[in-house]
Amino acid sequence: MHLLATDEFKKKLQELTKKNKTLAIQIDNKIVKLLDNPYLGKPLSHEFAGKRSIRVGVYRVIYEIKGDKIILLTIGHRKDVYSNP
């Protein structure tokens, strides 16, 4: 599997982890697990149909699988991340 990240994901990740190195490590560890098992995350529905979500504490990483690629779309707090498909 190949891992790709959108500009939105990169920007939000940098904002979240700039002052929180522990969170950065937790996110990295979860992404490594995702590379081993892309279907680890929960399938989403409605506006997010075809996408999946993995939990990192109170944050969610939204991603999709296309062929042999995992595309990291966005990351955010669980109360906000689903409000902007």
Image (tube, rainbow, N blue to C red):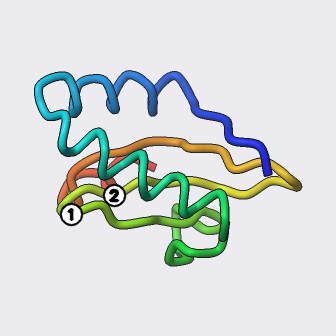
Q: Which residue is drawn at 56% across and 76% down?
A: 43
What amino acid does circle 2 point to? Arg
**Residue for point 56% across, 75% down:** 40
- The x, y position of residue 75, in whole percent, is 36, 45
Which amino acid type is marked by label 1? Gly
Location of residue 78 (image quadrant): bottom left
Q: Nearer the viewer, residue 28 or 15?
A: 28
Can you identify the residue that label 2 sits on?
60
Measured from the top left, where is residue 57 in percent x and y?
21, 63
Q: Which residue lies furthest to the left in this view?
A: 19
Residue 34, relative to residue 24: is it above or below? below
Distance, label 1 to label 2, CA atoms, is: 8 Å
- The answer to which of 2 and 65 lies nearer the viewer is 2
Q: Who's the residue at 42% across and 45% down the image? A: 28
Residue at the spot of label 1: 57
Query: Which element type, helix, strand or loop, lies under badge 1?
Result: loop
Q: Which residue lies furthest to the right in this view?
A: 67
**Image location (x, y in percent) of residue 79:** 18, 60
Q: Which mark lies nearer to you, 1 or 2?
A: 1
Image: 74 above or below 40 = above
Q: How crowded is mark 1: few (under 14 residues within 10 Å), some or many (20 or more)?
A: few
**Figure quadrant of residue 18:** top left
